[in-house]
Amino acid sequence: MTGQNARRVTVVPNGPMLVEGPVELVTDDGVTHTSDRFVVAVCACRRSKRFPFCDTSHRKRVRDDPPDGAGQPPNPAAKAESDSRSG
C-alpha cells in the first residue's frame, strides 16, 4: 500500500476506532456507509444508534465483556452468573 492510499486507524481504549477519512465502511449485512470527514469515529462497542459510526454510547456504560468479545454486546446472563459466584 502506498503512503498516498494508506489510512491511519487509532484504537481508543474503551472507545471508537478513529479512521482518517474519507472512508467507505461495509457492514456485515453488505451495506456501504460513506463519510467524507477528515476523521471518522467507527463504533467498536456496537451500542451506537448510528452504527457503524460512533455516537459516544460507549461512555454511558463501561464494557464488562473480555477483550476477545470485541464487537459483541455484553452478555447479561454471564454477568449474572459471575455476580452470583462472587457473592
Image (cartoon, grey):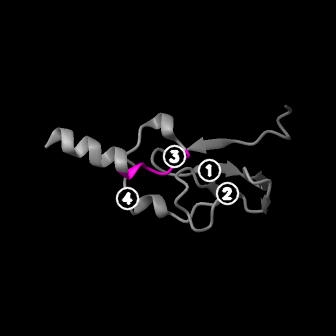
Quick one: which residue is furthest to the left in this view?
Answer: 87
Residue 61 - label:
4
Calculate the distance from the C-alpha at mark 2 to the C-alpha at mark 1: 6 Å
The kind of residue on which mark 3 rests is Val
4 or 26: nearer the eye? 26
Where is residue 18 drawn, in percent x and y?
62, 50
Contact between labelled residues 1 and 3, with CB atoms less than 8 Å apart? yes
The quarter of the displayed image where residue 84 is located:
top left
Check the picture and name the quadrant holding the C terminus: top left
The quarter of the displayed image where residue 35 is located:
bottom right
Q: Secondary structure at mark 1?
A: strand
Where is residue 7 drawn, in percent x and y?
75, 42
Q: Is residue 80 left or right of residue 38?
A: left
Query: What crowding class fits label 2: few (fewer than 14 Cα within 10 Å), some (14-19), or many (20 or more)?
Result: many
| Start-end of magenta stretch | 71-76
The quarter of the displayed image where residue 21 is located:
bottom right
Q: Which residue is mark 3?
A: 12
Which residue is drawn at the image coordinates 39% and 63% (left, top)?
60
Numbered disc total: 4
Residue 68 sits above or below residue 12 on the image: above
Magenta includes 23? no
The kind of residue on which mark 1 rests is Leu
Q: Which residue is mark 1?
A: 18
